[in-house]
Amino acid sequence: MPIRSDGKRYFLEGNQTAYVLAVRNDKLVEHLYWGPKLPLDTDYPQADRNPSFAFENPQGLIPLEYPAWGGLRFSEPCLKVEFSNGCRDTRLVFEEAAILPRDEAGQPHLVIRLADTAYPLRVELHYRLYEALDIVERWAVVSNVATAESAGSAGTALEPGVIRLEQVFSACWHLPAGTPYCLTHLAGRWGGETQLRHDLLSEGKKVLESRRGATSHQANPWSALTPAGAAVGIDLAAAGTPVPPWPELGRPTGEEDGAVWYGALAWSGNWKIVVETTPYAQTQVLTGINDFDTVITLMPGEKFTTPACVAGYTEGGFGSMSRTLHRYQLRHVLPPASARQLRPVLYNSWEATHFAVNEQQQMKLADKAAQLGVELFVVDDGWFGRRQNDRAGLGDWYVNPEKFPRGLGPLIDHVHRLGMKFGLWVEPEMVNPDSDLYRQHPDWVLHFPARPRTESRYQLVLNLARPDVRQFILDFMDRLLSENPIDFIKWDMNRHLSEPGWPDEPPEHQREIWIRYGEGLYQVWDELRARHPKVLWESCSGGGGRVDLGILRRADQVWTSDNTDPFDRLFIQEGYSYAYSPKAMVSWVTDSPHWGNQRASSLRYRFHVAMSGTLGIGANLNHWSPAEMEEARALVAQYKAIRHLVQEGNLYRLISPRAGELAALQYVNEDAKEAVLFVYLHSRKRLWPVPPIHLRGLSPERVYSLETEEGRLQGPRRISGRALMACGLSLNLQGDFDSVMVRLKAE
Ligand code: GLA
């Protein structure tokens, strides 16, 4: 049984790891263990531990599964509430537990029910175990269980009425105490998303968050912790925390070796990850919706379900962490209808034509795209309303009659006749003040009375918490998709939320806007997907501003960054790959020199970078010479032959672009019979030769035959898996921004 109990402790055991919690004698639910699976139940810690330090009440230091603020607890809580009589102290104790062998997702599931000792507050903690992946999904359901009768009865609720939730996280994850940690996270900005950061933690808190109403380019709701060894000056001896039998915790974690505790949140609105190290060398990670400017009012009988967060443990380093997260996304996150389909090679005209789209010009580009073997042709911004630039038209979702006098029909037919699918860009959450929609419904945007409505990219944000706004979006999207045989939607969001007012709502509910907006967005996507099940969806937010496990339950793929320069992309894509699957990562080949930095690179290099995710082309094909068209056609064909490995295989980041002058990525299929290797040389310096590339994940006993361009291999075409991994593969690379792709097939 993957989830079982000995009456006091609850064991969640995956293939390699275990997560153990217990109901203490005082009925608190204590976290006991998260790490490698151990042979005997007696190997795991016992419950009822009371860390003891002078001037510190042990009650405040017990690692609780879902700490609520109350008593002498000074570390970050998961839950902070206010009852209607002004009481703000919460005491949650165990009430009951249920183990479901299979839940609605087909996974083993533990539910722990907690109740407040005096007030009508209940909390259900949910744990869904993915045994084969060694990861746990957690969320909480917080209920106001007051009824007219119970609210007045003596000994239970003191007063009927509302409960205000001021902080309600999805989970608290405790790491083994007594060791310092390093936090790995993703930071960035527009054009430079998902940059890896490694921070040494000492006492205090590191907060990763978004207050922008969206996931954001600036930070991403994912984190990983690794043992920092002796690097940080926490006084462990003085802390004296009991250290359970954790193996080799001081070992530094690498790409393929060492301990990693990691997690991510499935939420596309304001989110927060608090990593806290106490003065007693206890480290906890709290994950959930951001409490900033957020209060949820629960009326009697109402409940709030937090978004899910997922976490896992591995001893196989960052590489194993990423492969597990990728597999989890392919099997359990991406929309099931299309999760197993390989993503099509797309063409998008944005960089080629910007807003100046029209029927003739798009047909011409479609002809060229089809010659290259493109499978999906996407018309980006500019096709609707009076949209000549970004100053007008958002909100007016009718086809622009000057640009497409015959509607979209003839273009779609043309694209379909060429054997490609047809896709269209939309930005439904937004409105330009210069639009018919805004002139008709100025009250539909987020705003505070008598305050400015701050524009960004000349646009305002529609309040998706409002049912009439959601209905408007559903209606126009439904019409668009019903009247036109559209196969793909790119859903964009080009600004963040400001002045988050919701004047029509009673003031006590207004601070729920951050959550209701996100829920409203999900409702619309879910409904549209249900009504149009064959359509593929891409999430975009001014590049990679909306990449998270919440949107990936609804979007088949995401736009990674507006920065399409291939060298910059190596870094953006590396950070992305720590947390998210290459299958969902769209990468375009665009023109050289790049518009953003004037860096010139070869067509082959640009392709090789884009081929390490879901390939797209975003160049102006009218400018490509016949020779370039021919080269691109061959590269698209090569991609189609290896995309199953890139999109669904196991990724090994052999050499990080941050490491020096070289980067290398390898993708291997499940039975290690096939692999593809990409090597990128940034710059050859001082005539130093490219060192042999050590492959991974191959079968040592098998012999592989290698296929690559003429003149690239320094050795034989047949090499054993053992030699490829132990001795490496020697390749010829030259100059600046050179690259090579090698296919490997077991004989
Ligand atoms: C955003 C997207 C781009 C493009 C433009 C259109 O910036 O990230 O890919 O769609 O909007 O306005």
Image: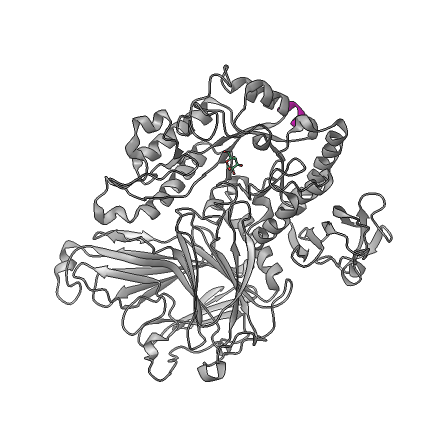
Residue 133 position (above or below residue 269): below
Q: Nearer the viewer, residue 325 or 593?
A: 593
- The mark tally for this picture is 0
Residue 626 position (above or below residue 170): above
Q: Which residues are magenta?
A: 366-370
Left or right, residue 565 beside residue 264: right
Left or right, residue 359 beside residue 721: left
Q: Nearer the viewer, residue 216 or 509?
A: 216
Place residue 631 in its image quadrant. Answer: top right
Q: Identify which residue is drawn at 59% across, 75% down.
A: 248
Left or right, residue 716 beside residue 56: right
Q: Can you give x and y, in whole percent of width and height, for residue 196 in the image?
A: 56, 57
Asked if the magenta segment contains residue 172, the reply would be no
Residue 214 position (above or below residue 17): above
Place residue 724 in its image quadrant. Answer: bottom right
Q: Can you give x and y, in whole percent of width and height, for residue 347 in the image?
A: 61, 32
| Residue 28 visible in the displayed image | yes
Q: Nearer the viewer, residue 215 or 638?
A: 215
Left or right, residue 243 beside residue 345: left
Q: Identify which residue is drawn at 67% across, 44% down.
A: 609
Place residue 23 in its image quadrant. Answer: bottom left
